[in-house]
Image: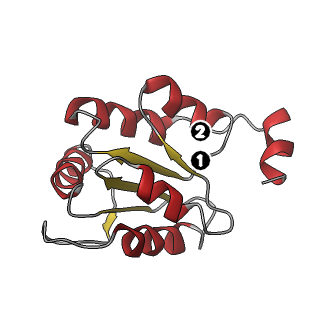
Amino acid sequence: MRKIFISSDHAGFELKENIKKYLKKKKIDFKDIGPMNNKSVDYPDYAHKVAQRVKMNKKNVGILVCGSGTGMNIAANKHKNIRAAQCFNLKSTKLSRLHNDANIITLGSRLTTKKNALRFIDVFLSTEFEGGRHLKRIKKI
């Protein structure tokens, strides 16, 4: 069974809370790794916590939110078997799953509207990896 882990830094806290409400409304189970308020924190700490949990099981996925999405993305991708994708639109989100088998989506709260972020989450969670020619490329990472 797939587990979803979600986290943010202080800049992404409000969007993270909105994503959590949306997931609850859709009856999608998830685990919030923190922070639990919008006080200043260091994004790498939370990116590492989510990445560690995601890599425990191939079915696990993560959602990370910071101001730009970039910091969380860089930190998460330091972990073996993590393929975090910074998503800006529906096409980048869909391709991150289809071609790259991304297991963490990173979003920028200062660059993405709430409406779009929720659409990206839907696409990320519902799109399956195509495998095939893409699998050999994933194995080279």
Q: CA distance from mark 1 to mark 2?
A: 5 Å
Contact? badges 1 and 2 (CB < 8 Å):
yes
Q: Is residue 13 left or right of residue 107?
A: left
Total labels: the figure holds 2
- Residue 82: x percent and y percent? 61, 61
Measured along the vertical axis of the image, is residue 53 above or below residue 92? Answer: below
| Residue 57 visible in the displayed image | yes
At x 83%, y 53%, the residue is: 139
Q: Which residue is mark 1?
A: 102
Q: Amino acid at mark 2?
A: Arg
Q: Is residue 126 left or right of residue 29?
A: right
Residue 108, image quadrant: top left
| Badge 1: residue crowd in 10 Å (few <14, some 14–19, many ≥20) | many
- Residue 88: x percent and y percent? 41, 32
At x 22%, y 52%, the residue is: 24
Measured along the vertical axis of the image, is residue 58 above or below residue 68? Answer: below
Q: Which residue is mark 2?
A: 97
Q: Earlier in the sequence, mark 1 or mark 2?
A: 2
Q: Amino acid at mark 1?
A: Ala
Local SS, label 2: helix
- Residue 44: x percent and y percent? 42, 70
